[in-house]
Amino acid sequence: MSDDPGAVAGVAPAEADASWYALAPAEVAAELKVDPAGGLSTGEAQQRLQEYGPNALAAAKQEPVWKRFFKHYQDYMQIVLVVAALVSLLIAEYGTAIGLALLTLFNAWLGYHQEGKAEEAAASLGQMMKAMAKVRRDGDVVELPAEQIVPGDIVVVDAGDRVPADGRIILAATLQIEEGALTGESVAVEKDTETIGRHDVGIGDRLNMAFMNTNVTRGHGEILVTTTGMGSEVGHIAHMLSGQKVEKTPLTKQVDRLTIFIIIAALFAFIAIVVMGLASGESFAVLFGIGVALAVGSIPDALPAVVTTILSVGSVNMAKKNAIMKVLPAVETLGSTSAINSDKTGTLTLNQMTVREITTVQHHYTVSGEGYSFDGQIQRTTGDAERDLDYVMFSCALCNDSDINDGEVVGDPTEAALYVLAQKGGVDVREFRRNNPRVASVPFDSDYKFMATFHRMPGADGRPVIRAYVKGAPDVLLSRSSFGRMPGGHAERLTDEMRGKVLAENDRIASQGRRVLALAQREFDPATFQPSGDLMALMQDLEISALVGEVDPPRAEAVAAIAKAKHAGIRVRMITGDHAVTAAAIADELGIRGRAVTGAEFAAMSDAEADSQVDGIGVIARVAPEHKVRLVEVLKRKGNIVAMTGDGVNDAPAIAAADIGIAMGITGTDVAKGAAKMILADDNFATIVAAVEEGRLVYDNLQKFIRIQVANLFMFILAFIGSSAFAIAGTALLSPAQVLWIHMAIVAPIGAVMGLDLATPGIMDRKPRPFNQPILVRSMMVRLFVVGLFMAAATLILVQIGKTTYGSLEIGQTMAVVGLGLMNIFVALNLRYPTESAFGPATVSNPKLLWAFAWAVLGSMLITQMKVMQDLFGTLPLTGQQWLLCLVPGVVLLFLGELFKIILRARQSKGQAAVSAPPVPA
């Protein structure tokens, strides 16, 4: 595709950047050379189809399967496994080599099948286009595949239709379009044909435009297609999505750095052994074999498998909590999250309009319950007792075109909220409608902003009347009303003071971010009423009865989840297509702090301004896709690990740009799901916080596994170098088989079980770790070096005792192997919780870890007592005294570790006391 933006498929180069909303319908028709009354001719449409291409989104180019598979061998962890397999072949450890090779295949297969790719997101965008559309061609309306629509076509849409392409609305009869998937706005937009006389108007405010893949919820309209395919707003998002670079997760980067460190350390040990051995006259062949064995023992070749297993188990646990992970490393990334940008509608809120309050002339009521459930109560908060609210409930039930079936809404969500209110008020809406059928109606229109229905009903005196129920904009209905409904059922003429109170109440409700509707009614004599007459003329001298405040309510569990996230040091921001006032009110209810700005205001900030102000921003309203992407970039630039939630097409670029993109499983579009690394099966923000906790557990356990691996890395290197330097056993401190026994049979099982350990207490009381913090901080690395040094020294002492006291290097090697097996038990107890005592109840909280310790003891017995094991690993039986000597280093190590933890806890308590202490008066 050309780099020229004017060459985007579906847009004529001259008009690629045209602000169609700023042109009158006649001007748009002239630009596109079409007569709206007849539409394009078949021949002209075919010519334009050749010129602009099909009305479809460009499919991403698929890589060959083999290339996608072997791409997973670029990871450092995989490279380590491959190298370990090769060196295992060199030392004739064929079983190990085969096992490692199979492990690399498993890792590559797992990554190939579990990682979502950007091209899949683009492909799902294309799937959304498989639809039919009603198009005027050659003067007739015909149904055509949406792919055949071209600029200049006249598309006819009705309620229930999906808009097939971007276009200028040239006819709108009570036309409403739900654009949430594109703009994020929770309420359907009323469309008109009026020209907008300014430029740089946001998508959500282009009321005379319709956009591809949005849904018509009400009315009838005609759209003059201006852009198709990749030139549409959805196409623009597809461009942004394809341009997002897939970055490695923070965990992957950290494991890469650790792996490089381990490789360098092992290579240093290998070179040191060879050089020192050659200097002492040993043969290169023997030195090479020992050096390779040391390198294999030093490199934690179980690291990729254990990392994959830890992440897989975390992924399964998250799935049980309704968080579906598509990319394994993202499990840990979520645990590191410091900023969550959450879509409002459906995630923080129910995405179900709900009436919260009712105001009549002399009363105010609050309404409980949420969404489209009929459970809830209406409670009076001001005014004297009133007999009933039938006059309000009848309006809600009858002046209403919506229906609700088992919680599913058919029709407009705003009307559905009134339907629910009537049910809560004791009206069986369906039965009531059957008993009071509609005899005439004035449909809603954005020009006059109200709707009216007429019904034959008994009047107050029992005689039949034609009663009109009206709902609409408060200012409009108030201007058409002469009376107010008073307690007791009588009407009273409205005074200027009463009108002022109604307007003030309207402003009060609206200032809380609620949508306000007014209800009114009027009665007519059945003898003179003409259903086919001029009904609009009758819409005067109305009796205004109530104001109703609706809102998409916050999820109750989201409030608690946001508070928990705040306690854990995670900043939550709300992103929405709604107006700033509405968004700010909802944010306040949710406990989200920070000022509300519009997307346009955020876009107008320079990078420096955005960086300095973003910490004070809690809400961004009326956002476009590029605003969301910029927010992600700003937060990442400031060192945050960013999670981004969303459900619509407009959310996909930001979801892809975030460290952890989260899509809604219920309301989410295929595009959002394709771009995400995690999918919320229940569309619930609280699930994100639960998944964060699981992610922190995963990282915590991964650290436990790596600690014991690195401690043994230092031990092997220091022990072999020390053996040569102090002439204890030269380079023959341990045989290659003995090295692999400690490495594979002792360290790997204990480390693997620690990697699947239970949660550390207080895991959600910590602040998120810095994004650039290594998986092992410097203080921990020093601590591990000291532990490794102690283990190496103990190993050399045991070998020396075997040589001098018992006169046998083989006994010394056997004591060293057993001693290392037992020491690793105490190392695990020391390093499992870096500051908590090993003598607490947490030590016995994980039975699997106790079994791993038992195996270390049993394995040490087997390798010394069984003849076949003795021959295989070059060991000898040990006496009780020798076993006691092997146990001593581990006990000493545990004692020193406990002493260090006591000092560490004392320092921490002293530091916390210093921080919390009041200032000393001067």
Image: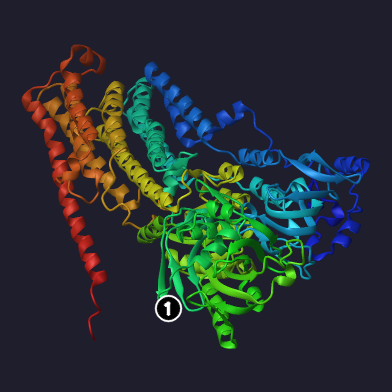
In the rendered view of the protein, which quadrant contains the N terminus?
Answer: top right
- Is residue 210 shown left or right of residue 262? right
State the image coordinates of residue 345 (x, y, percent, origin top left). 53, 56
Which residue lies at the image location 10% right of the left edge and 23% below the top edge?
806
State the image coordinates of residue 443 (x, y, percent, origin top left). 70, 61
Q: Number of numbered discs present? A: 1
The foreground one among 462 and 906 is 462
The foreground one among 64 and 385 is 385
In the rendered view of the protein, which quadrant contains the C terminus?
Answer: bottom left
Secondary structure category for the residue under label 1: loop
Give the colouring mode of the picture.
rainbow
Seen in the picture, residue 397 relative to 671 is either above or below; the reply is below
Work out whether residue 612 can be spotted: no
- Res 893 quadrant in image: top left
Seen in the picture, residue 562 relative to 93 is either above or below; the reply is below
Q: Residue beneath label 1, please?
A: 383
Q: Amino acid at mark 1?
A: Gly
The foreground one among 371 and 588 is 371
State the image coordinates of residue 705 (x, y, percent, origin top left). 32, 39
